[in-house]
Image (cartoon, rainbow, N blue to C red):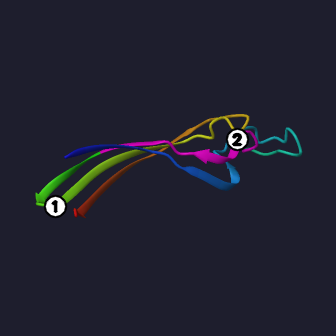
């Protein structure tokens, strides 16, 4: 049985991410290589997968999930990062 998913999340870091901007000090209040991004980022995600039923109400699961990090232009710049492609395998007991 195939499946698709959409998800999202919120990330807060104690430093601005992703690193972007000039290494030179532009303004003393907000300086450094990350000064043009944000400590708040969002993670839109999309995935596909399949449940392969080996017995009634028992399945082996295969999936792939793509994750992106973006600050949604909350900083001066929004470089965005295509973070990862995750693969998973699992076993499920259905009720």
Relative to residue 34, is residue 55 drawn left or right? Answer: left
Image coordinates of residue 92 in percent, x first then y, are 24, 62
Quadrant of residue 20 within the rendered picture: top right
| Residue numbers of the magenta segment | 34-48
Q: Secondary structure at mark 1?
A: loop
Indicate the position of residue 83 as horizontal and vertical percent values: 49, 45
Identify the residue at horizontal 33%, vertical 47% (top origin).
64
Classify the position of the C terminus by image quarter: bottom left
Q: Left or right of 90: which side holds 58? A: left
Calculate the distance from the C-alpha at mark 2 to the C-alpha at mark 1. 47 Å
Q: Residue farthest to the right?
A: 28
Q: Which residue is mark 2?
A: 37
User: Which percent across, then down, holds residue 11?
Assistant: 60, 52
Q: Earlier in the sequence, mark 2 or mark 1?
A: 2
User: Residue at coordinates 27% horizontally, 44% vertically from top-left?
Assistant: 3
| Residue for badge 1 | 57
Disc 2 packing (10 Å; few <14; some 14–19; many ≥20): many
Q: Residue furthest front?
A: 95
In the image, what residue occupies the spot 74% across and 39% down? 36
Q: Secondary structure at mark 2?
A: loop
Residue 36 lies in the magenta-colored region: yes
Q: Which secondary structure is most common in the magenta stretch?
A: strand
Instruction: Classify 56 as above or below 37.
Output: below
Q: Position of residue 34 (x, y in %)?
A: 72, 45
Among the 4 quarters of the image, the one containing residue 2? top left
- Residue shown at 53% from the left, 49% from the top: 9
Q: Nearer the viewer, mark 2 or mark 1?
A: 1
22 is within the stretch colored magenta: no
């Amino acid at each position: 049985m195939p499946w698709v998913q959409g998800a999202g999340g919120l990330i807060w870091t104690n430093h601005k991410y992703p690193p972007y901007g000039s290494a030179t000090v532009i303004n003393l209040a907000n300086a450094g290589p990350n000064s043009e991004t944000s400590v708040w980022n969002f993670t839109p995600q999309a995935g596909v997968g399949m449940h392969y039923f080996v017995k009634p109400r028992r399945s082996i699961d295969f999936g792939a999930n793509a994750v992106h990090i973006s600050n949604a232009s909350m900083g001066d710049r929004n470089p965005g990062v295509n973070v990862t492609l995750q693969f998973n395998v699992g076993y499920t007991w259905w009720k």
